[in-house]
Image: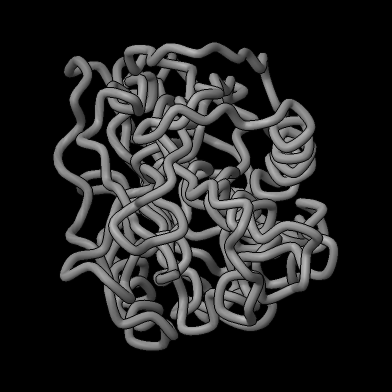
């Protein structure tokens, strides 16, 4: 690349950043982590929703850059030949993207998808639902499950000598079975379900579900995402259903609460319209959430665990880390 071409690429990158609909542009990619040998990386930049090629996108790695042609194709020279290589991609009208590749000499055929900064994508909704911008002082990294979640139900209440009937647990399991694929863009399914009368330790791959007659005035609480977690549900058969504890008129308020709590289990938070966004609707079947909920949930599950705002993948070493090792975040939901 000549000095003139290099200058033109840098100017396009700056212009793209200025035109972006998202004002949060991360810092440049740090220097390559691999060896001193250099190679090329080639592929195509496409739209996330339609896979249409994106021309005029600027890709940068370290001190080199290139621009996609009208077919979205690119070849980026001067990329580290081994180890992790971070590449930033910026195109007018699209969310800033950083993706990390595990490099090999002359790697080709890669596809990088960009999210368009326009409906159906809503950056503010995404930040609430996926990053916890509504209740947290800092935007959170994503916590999708990287395996199918398994559930252990402790059938005896934690605070009184009462046993939850099998048919109640069966109904909750059916909610989870429907909700998990819907909340992961079809990438995860309900795993193994077990029941017992004693408590279990938290282990990777499992969510421990417990019941109590008193949850400090709340109807439920859950940890958020990762590859392990806990869920506590209020079990009070005599509790009268109200629009507050059973907004969709299910035959038992508990099924609606389970329908909501599983959204936290799968890695999501509250929004300004939590009831409309997180519940599956009349009947509390676990499936049938609004389109925007399903779209933005699928985006999170299309990215590696640890993706940060606005669309920045973690170093490759973190992508294989079991999310269960993260500090667990717990959310309490709804007052009685």
Q: Judge by depth and name the residue closer to the eye, 6 or 218.
A: 218
For the C terminus, the quadrant is bottom left
Q: Residue at x 73, y 26 (%)?
A: 166
Q: Residue at x 62, y 23 (%)?
A: 148
Q: Residue at x 53, y 51 (%)?
A: 261
Q: Is residue 62 left or right of residue 102?
A: left
Residue 207 in picture, x, y percent from top left: 47, 26
User: Above or below — where is 143 with respect to 104?
Assistant: below
Residue 164: quadrant of the picture: top right
Residue 32: quadrant of the picture: top left
Residue 272 in picture, x, y percent from top left: 46, 83
- Whether residue 47 is visible, yes or no, is no
Q: Residue at x 35, y 52 (%)?
A: 215
Residue 75 in picture, x, y percent from top left: 52, 42
Q: Judge by depth and name the residue closer to the eye, 142 or 248.
A: 248
User: Above or below — where is 149 with respect to 182?
Assistant: above
User: Above or below — where is 239 with respect to 36?
Assistant: below
User: Above or below — where is 56 with respect to 119?
Assistant: above
Q: Judge by depth and name the residue closer to the eye, 169 or 303.
A: 169
Residue 33: quadrant of the picture: top left
Colour theme? one colour
């Amino acid at each position: 690349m000549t000095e003139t071409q290099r200058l033109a690429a840098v100017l396009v990158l700056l212009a793209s950043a200025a035109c972006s609909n998202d004002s949060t542009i991360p810092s440049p990619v740090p220097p390559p982590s691999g060896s001193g040998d250099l190679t090329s990386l080639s592929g195509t930049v496409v739209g996330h929703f339609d896979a249409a090629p994106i021309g005029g996108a600027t890709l940068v790695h370290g001190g080199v850059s290139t621009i996609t042609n009208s077919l979205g194709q690119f070849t980026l020279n001067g990329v580290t030949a081994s180890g992790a290589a971070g590449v930033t991609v910026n195109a007018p009208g699209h969310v800033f993207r950083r993706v990390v590749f595990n490099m090999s000499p002359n790697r080709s055929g890669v596809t990088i998808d960009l999210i368009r900064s326009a409906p159906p994508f809503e950056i503010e909704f995404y930040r609430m639902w996926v990053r916890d911008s509504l209740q947290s002082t800092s935007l959170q990294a994503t916590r999708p499950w990287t395996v199918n979640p398994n559930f252990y139900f402790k059938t005896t209440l934690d605070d009184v000598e009462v046993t939850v009937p099998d048919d109640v647990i069966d109904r909750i399991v059916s909610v989870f079975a429907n909700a998990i694929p819907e909340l992961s863009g079809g990438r995860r399914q309900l795993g193994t379900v077990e029941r017992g009368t004693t408590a279990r330790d938290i282990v990777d791959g499992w969510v421990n579900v417990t019941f109590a007659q008193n949850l400090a005035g709340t109807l439920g609480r859950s940890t958020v995402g990762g590859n392990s977690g806990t869920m506590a549900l209020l079990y009070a058969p005599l509790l009268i259903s109200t629009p507050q504890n059973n907004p969709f008129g299910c035959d038992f308020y508990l099924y609606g609460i389970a329908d909501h709590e599983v959204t936290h289990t799968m890695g999501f938070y509250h929004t300004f319209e939590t009831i409309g966004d997180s519940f599956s609707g009349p009947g509390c079947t676990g499936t049938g959430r609004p389109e925007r909920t399903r779209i933005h949930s699928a985006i999170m599950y299309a990215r590696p665990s640890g993706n940060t705002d606005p669309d920045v993948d973690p170093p490759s070493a973190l992508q294989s880390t079991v999310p269960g090792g993260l500090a667990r975040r717990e959310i309490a939901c709804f007052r009685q």
